[in-house]
Amino acid sequence: MSAPSSYDPAPIYDSVDIDMVVKVLSQTAFSPFFTCFIPIFYIFQGYEFVNPVVLVPSIYCAAVSAFWLLKWISQLYRNQGSFFFKPKPLDWSEQIVVITGGASGVGELLANTLAVRNVTVVVLDVKPIVTENYNIVYYQCDVSKWEEVEAVSKKIIDEIGQPTMLVNNAGVVQGKLIIDLKPEDVYQTFGVNTLAHFWTLKAFLPGMIKNKTGHIVTMSSVVGFVGCVRMADYSASKAALMIINESLRYELDKVYDAPGIRTTIVCPGHILTPLFSTVRLPSNPFFQFFVPSIAPVTVVKAIITALDAQQSQTIFLPFYTNLSPVVRMIPSYLRDLCQKFSGADYSMRNFTKVTARRPDEVDLPVANGKD
């Protein structure tokens, strides 16, 4: 049985799922602040420290504290942070953010949300963004073509200024079996989903390197870790982004001596956007609890939080996607069981590609959106 529509936001946003449970637990049972009060409570009741009633919670509290401490140290190391001083608050009014595929879906919501913060937002897409925000500037551009990206980037730098943040969000999906993919389908998928990242980096990264500051956000996908039916080209194009992001990080640190340029990669599961509006996922409560779809606003919040924190991050949304890198290492029978439970091999069976119209062309796939 399939859900009536994966683009129906009403029943999922406020439902109880594993992400809500994890969020509550992170503030209670897995919180060092909360767990430290448990042994203290028993000590004040007159129990000796060596008593298991006190000793066991104390060990658990120490383990939880050690976990969060190591995570914090790792974050400081990755972002060259200080043990004693926080970075200066980000001045959003001075930021120029370029968003590819910003005409709809996650890109559109991110553009409008940043614009409310008085940020200058530049949208690159094959179709214009419909918005009332005066500080959103649209440039028509097929980001899969280097010639167009090069020409538009020069106009942006001359007319608006050097971008300080780049969100590579553009994406297309074909939803076809491998033997049904036409050469132009494959070229388009890799052109928009993968090669466009090279083109925008070539265009905007030199200015960031010169200023030794900036932030690159790469929109990948959970299917970059796992393959499924009718998603071979899409999954491969998203998997490539993992290596691009990692290689970029090392080049910035080791070659250009520009660790101040942050790199964030987002690996979401199914997002309720038009790009995957015809995907059919299992509708049983068990699946929706453990493998929920997420609203675009959830992704946008995570991106803005990362930008505001001025830290390089790897963002997995929702919670189950944290397990996706591990899936490749488990025995094949467990891997197949996970695949069957996810319904991934059947979700694209009735997929219909969303198209957009460009002023000078017709029936072009939407260069936007997310997984």
Image: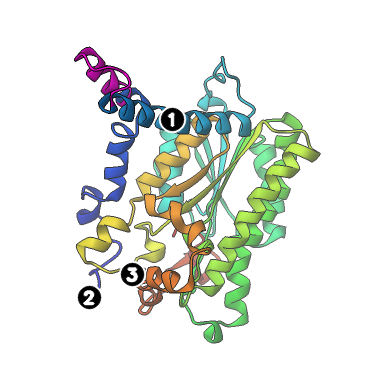
Say which residue appears at 36% left-offset and 45% top-offset: 298
Where is the N terminus found, in terms of image quarters?
bottom left
Density class for disc 3 (Cα within 10 Å; few <14, some 14-19, many ≥20) is some
**Spatial CA span between label 1 and label 3:** 41 Å
Instruction: Check if mark 2's residue and mark 3's residue have beta carbons within 8 Å.
Output: no
- Amino acid at dot 1: Arg
Q: Nearer the viewer, residue 341 or 214?
A: 341
Task: Specify which label sits upstream in the sequence, 1 or 3.
Answer: 1
Instruction: For mark 2, give the secondary structure.
Output: loop
Instruction: For mark 1, give the secondary structure.
Output: loop
Density class for disc 2 (Cα within 10 Å; few <14, some 14-19, many ≥20) is few
Task: Specify which label sits upstream in the sequence, 2 or 3.
Answer: 2
- Residue 281 rendering spot, x and y as whole percentages: 31, 68
**Spatial CA span between label 2 and label 3:** 13 Å
Q: Which residue is mark 3?
A: 341
Say which residue appears at 34% left-offset and 65% top-offset: 277
Say which residue appears at 42% left-offset and 69% top-offset: 334
Please name which of the two marks, 2 or 3, marks the residue nearer to the observer: 3
Q: Which residues are magenta?
A: 35-51
Q: Which residue is mark 2?
A: 1
- Amino acid at dot 3: Phe
**Relative height, residue 300 to residue 103 (above, below):** above
- Residue 127 rendering spot, x and y as whole percentages: 49, 58
Q: Which residue is mark 1?
A: 117
Please name which of the two marks, 1 or 3, marks the residue nearer to the observer: 3
Density class for disc 1 (Cα within 10 Å; few <14, some 14-19, many ≥20) is few
Task: Specify which label sits upstream in the sequence, 1 or 2.
Answer: 2
Name the colouring of the figure.
rainbow
Instruction: For mark 3, give the secondary structure.
Output: helix
Q: Specify whether residue 49 is painted magenta.
A: yes
